């Protein structure tokens, strides 16, 4: 079964058509990179997948079921900036999602449950390379570390779908390369499907299993509001990259941790 099934999706804001008849099947465990000119509706598309916005027309199914009306723990998100809470420590940020989920039942986490969540949060913080920074605040972290924190915060909820909106766009090239390695490792290890918006083609080809381009097919300025963007290209990466499996040509750099000898 496909993880995400998007059928004839339209999104309009008032008179402006942003997305026009977008249909795509995204298989479970895919890593889709979404590219396209600025303003063509990529972030809007992610917000629809997240459940932060409702489509004007069309259908979004997650594992065969219509998306719930609100964002839920099955979908995690990381933005280019400001995904984390500045007033909470690294540990507090990573624990928060679990605490909020628990607080629907009990007011807060207690005793053994709280310790288990804390242990899990510490393990996740270590997994993204932030061990030792548990008590720091986001403002005390570099941009790259903040994005690692945002990933940990999303991943601790074990989302089925991870949505990334230009998450590494503001990072320096060296830091970016490091976080790409981490991102690949996380995708290989966690049972999730990833949809990532990027303006960097190199990044798209480094990480994705599939690169999808959004464009307005009829881009005349005077008609800008009348036609939305849709999928104009859908490229499968070669050689095939598969979650949990070492790549044919670069097993050292592209594969699950076990094959990286770590
Ligand atoms: N909440 C909103 N209300 C009205 N228009 C919006 C809203 N969000 C986005 N838009 C418009 O939708 C278009 C696509 O925006 P966006 O999805 O942010 O593009 P991208 O992420 O591809 O740069 C833009 O023209 C933007 O002005
Ligand atoms: Mg955007």
Image (spheres, grey):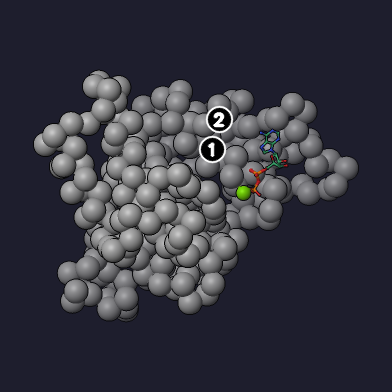
Q: Are marks 2 and 1 in contact (CB under 8 Å)?
A: yes
Category of crowding for the residue at label 2, using alpha-carbon neighbours closer than 10 angstroms: few (below 14), some (14–19), many (at least 20): some
CA separation in Å, label 2 and label 1: 6 Å
Q: Residue at x 32, y 71 (%)?
A: 254
Dot 2 falls on a residue whose secondary structure is loop
**Quarter of image, res 54:** top right
| Direction from residue 4 to residue 124 in the image, left or right | left
**Quarter of image, res 104:** top left
Q: Residue at x 22, y 68 (%)?
A: 257
Image coordinates for residue 16, horizontal then vertical, percent: 75, 33
Give the quarter the ligand 1 occupies: top right
In terms of sequence position, does the residue under pointer 2 or pointer 1 come before the other?
1
Q: Quadrant of the C terminus?
A: bottom left
Foreground residue among 191 and 80: 80
211 to 15, vertically: above or below: below
171 to 8, vertically: above or below: below
Q: Residue furthest right?
A: 222
The residue that mark 2 highlights is 53
Image coordinates for residue 136, horizontal then vertical, percent: 38, 56
Image coordinates for residue 100, horizontal then vertical, percent: 33, 31
Q: Residue at x 55, y 30 (%)?
A: 53
Q: Residue at x 54, y 52 (%)?
A: 81
Category of crowding for the residue at label 1, using alpha-carbon neighbours closer than 10 angstroms: few (below 14), some (14–19), many (at least 20): some
For the question of whether residue 120 can be seen, the reply is yes
| Direction from residue 119 to residue 155 in the image, left or right | right
- Determine if the C-beta at disc 2 is less than 8 A from ligand 1: yes
Image coordinates for residue 103, horizontal then vertical, percent: 29, 25
The numbered mark at residue 47 is: 1
Foreground residue among 136 and 51: 136
Foreground residue among 19 and 144: 144
- Determine if the C-beta at disc 1 is less than 8 A from ligand 1: yes
């Amino acid at each position: 079964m496909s993880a995400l099934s998007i059928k004839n999706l339209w999104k309009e804001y008032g008179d402006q058509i942003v997305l026009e008849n977008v249909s795509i099947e995204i298989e479970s465990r895919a890593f889709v990179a979404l590219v396209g000119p600025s303003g063509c509706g990529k972030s809007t598309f992610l917000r629809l997948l997240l459940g932060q916005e409702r489509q004007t027309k069309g259908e979004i199914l997650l594992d065969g079921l219509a998306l719930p009306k609100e964002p839920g723990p099955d979908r995690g998100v990381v933005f280019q900036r400001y995904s984390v809470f500045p007033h909470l420590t690294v540990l507090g940020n990573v624990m928060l999602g679990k605490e909020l989920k628990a607080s629907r039942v009990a007011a807060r986490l207690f005793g053994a449950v709280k310790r288990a969540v804390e242990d899990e949060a510490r393990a996740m913080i270590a997994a993204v390379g932030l061990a030792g920074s548990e008590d720091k605040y986001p403002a005390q972290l570099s941009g790259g570390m903040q994005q690692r924190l945002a990933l940990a915060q999303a991943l601790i909820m074990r989302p089925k779908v991870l949505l990334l909106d230009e998450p590494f766009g503001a990072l320096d090239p060296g830091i970016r390369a490091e976080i790409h390695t981490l991102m690949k490792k996380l995708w290989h290890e966690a049972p999730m499907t990833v949809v990532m918006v990027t303006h960097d083609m190199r990044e798209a080809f480094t990480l994705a299993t599939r690169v999808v381009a959004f464009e307005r097919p009829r881009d005349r300025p005077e008609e800008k509001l009348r036609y939305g963007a849709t999928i104009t290209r859908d490229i499968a990466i070669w050689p095939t990259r598969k979650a949990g499996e070492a790549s044919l040509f670069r097993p050292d750099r592209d594969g699950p941790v076990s094959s990286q000898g770590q």
